[in-house]
Image (cartoon, rainbow, N blue to C red):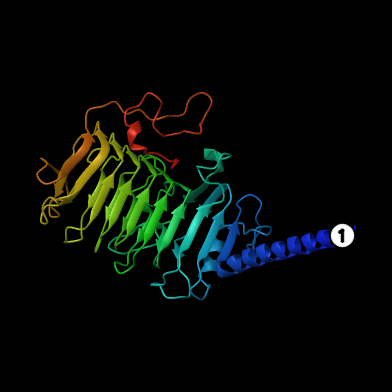
Amino acid sequence: MKNKTMLQTVKIRYTMMTLFTVLFVFNTTVSMAQTVYVDAQKGKNNASGTLTDPILSLDEAVLKTNSFKGNKPVNLRLNPGLYTVTHKLTLKTVSPAISNAAYTIEAVIMPDDKEWHPASMPVILSASGNNDDYEFAHCVGFFVSRNNVIIKGLKFLGNPNTAVHYYYPIRRQDKALSGLNVSQCYFIGEANSTAIQSSFWASGPGIHVDHCIFHNSKIAFVLGDNVNDFCLSHSIIDGAYNTAIWYGFAKTTAKFTFKNNIITNCYYVMVYPVEDGQPSYTFSASYITNNAHYLGNYPKAQDRFFAEANKHIKEVNVVKKAVVKLVSVADDGITRDNLNLSKASAGKSTGAGIFSK
């Protein structure tokens, strides 16, 4: 009996030590990152930004991270809700822009979670007027000013401010910065009311985009200076009424990975400066269907596109004749698979869409 009691005591002590160890490791891991929670429905102004005391506005949350020091990861976690942005949000910290630590903005509930629904997504709506004048007056949503920025699980809408002619939800101007990963995001524009000029206007290397849906953006990507190691995979670009990709200003033939994508209902698939000539990229395992034009060149002096036959693009398992159908709103409203490939659609083999699993 005495031995049994001693054994129970040892087990209790062991369990407590194990629990203490787990808590210590958890707390240490949390302390190594700088995490801010945001909740557009339940948050408060001037909150601490903890899980139980979230900040109300995205503007305030981003401003808070601007003061973070050190080389620790930054995690900005957004609960479901509508986040109205009133000015350009600069993603940076006090630590050097070339820091290797990640700066992550992500949804608390991600598309692959069982409880996810489009209503679970944080919605980013910029109502700002023009807030940048680089090259011309325009509006920027997220202005990336550091290395290794990660954006996951957000829905970007167009800008309804009628004073804005050019709106860019994600902008990286500094061509020396690297590492911009965007995953499982929607970019949804409407030309007559909430237009998106281009979902991305980005320079610099290491731009990786996967499982995103671009719907009715005028342009999905404007790729600027020093672009290298650009990767677009498992994504759907639908209804780009200018071009899906404008590869324009790098002056070099950069590394370009294009695989498992759907490009449909666009005016052009890709355009490039006539002075630089048609690049030699490889498009693979993708469906490129029902577009007015495939490739086009752009003479700056004439400020228009000219369709051009494919001379250098290598195509590996690219399908150009197929019926691609996307799920659209029906009588019961937005469904879980909104704007993804419908059950009857071609292109299922690509795995393109908002879900990565």
Quadrant housing the N terminus: bottom right
Rendering quarter of residue 339: top left
Query: Can you tell which quarter of the image residue 120 is in?
Result: top right
| Near-viewer residue (48 or 27) | 27
Residue at x 26%, y 47% (from the top left corner): 258
* Of 169 and 92, the residue lying toward us: 92
Position of 200 relative to 341 (above/below): below
Q: Where is residue 192 shown, x and y percent of the image?
A: 37, 39
Judging depth in this view, the residue of 323 and 44 nearest the camera is: 323
Viewer can see residue 45: yes
Residue at 22% from the left image edge and 40% from the top image edge: 268
- Residue 57 is left or right of residue 297, and the answer is right
Task: Name the one closer to the observer, 350 or 249.
Answer: 350
Residue 296 in the image: state x and y as whole percent: 15, 44
Q: Quadrant of the C terminus?
A: top left
Neighbours of disc 1 within 10 Å: few (<14), some (14-19), many (20+): few
Task: State the residue position of label 1.
Answer: 5
Disc 1 secondary structure class = helix
Residue 47 visible to the viewer: no
Percent position of residue 243, x then y: 25, 43
Kind of residue indicated by mark 1: Thr
